[in-house]
Amino acid sequence: MKKIFLIAAAAIITLSASAQNLKFAHVNLQELVYLSADYESAQKTLAASQKEAQETYQSMVDEFNSKYSEYQQKASTWTATIRETKESELTRIQQSIQEFQQNIQTELSQQESELISPIQQKAIETVQKLAKDGGYVYVFEVGSLLYVNEAQSTDLTPAARKALGIPEGRTVEDLQAALQALQPQQ
């Protein structure tokens, strides 16, 4: 019985000692993704697609408004068949506008995902390499943490920024301002 107790105590001491040697790190993955040059390029591509979608939508709305205006002006002079034909045409245009809105939102979301996924993957792979090279047991994403004790966890964000070629002075706020300028006017 004494031997079992000694073995258990030795195991606890060994686990405790090895737990004290564990290295933890944290990283701001969102910052790494947002500040990468590829992200800015992806946002420019998305902005161009959004602008094109907005122009197409506006063209459809203009067509509807023009035909509706004509309908309002001339409906009283048209025969029942012409009036019904014009009403059907207006209904078809409205349905097309609604379908376009639904489809374009899905397509733009899909495009964004396709453009951003490789950027996220590259950032994750960079952090994983830094973690392996640094001997870290865990790397936590700061966006999902409530608290980080900076004294017991290493911030890998600066090293990852350097590895990804992100300029030292570049901030998320600067990027947001630049991207805001690209957004199409509503």
Image (cartoon, rainbow, N blue to C red):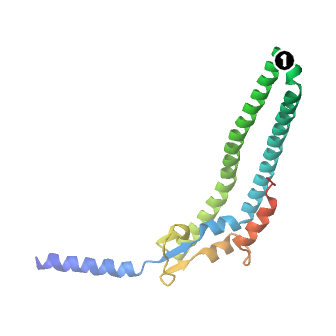
Give the residue drawn at x 47%, y 82%.
Answer: 152
Horizontal side, residue 175 vs residue 123: left or right: right
Q: Residue furthest front?
A: 76
Q: Residue furthest left?
A: 1
Picture coordinates of residue 26 (x, y %)?
53, 73
Residue 179, position as x, y percentages in the image: 77, 63
Residue 44 visible in the shown view: yes
Name the spot of residue 4 as percent of width and height, x first: 15, 75
Q: Position of residue 174 (x, y in %)?
A: 75, 71
Residue located 82% across and 42% down the image: 58
Label 1 secondary element: helix
Q: Crowding near pointer 1: few (<14 within 10 Å), some, many (20+)?
A: few
In the displayed structure, would residue 176 be above or below residue 109?
Answer: below
Which of 101 and 45 lies nearest the eye of the viewer?
Answer: 101
138 is higher (above) or lower (below) than 113: below
Asked if residue 90 is positioned above or below residue 142 in the image, the reply reads: above
Of 154 and 103, the residue lying toward us: 103
Residue 135 visible? The answer is no
Q: Quadrant of residue 118?
A: bottom right
> Label 1 is placed on what type of residue?
Ile
Location of residue 99 (image quadrant): top right
The residue at which mark 1 appears reads as: 82
Quadrant location of residue 100?
top right
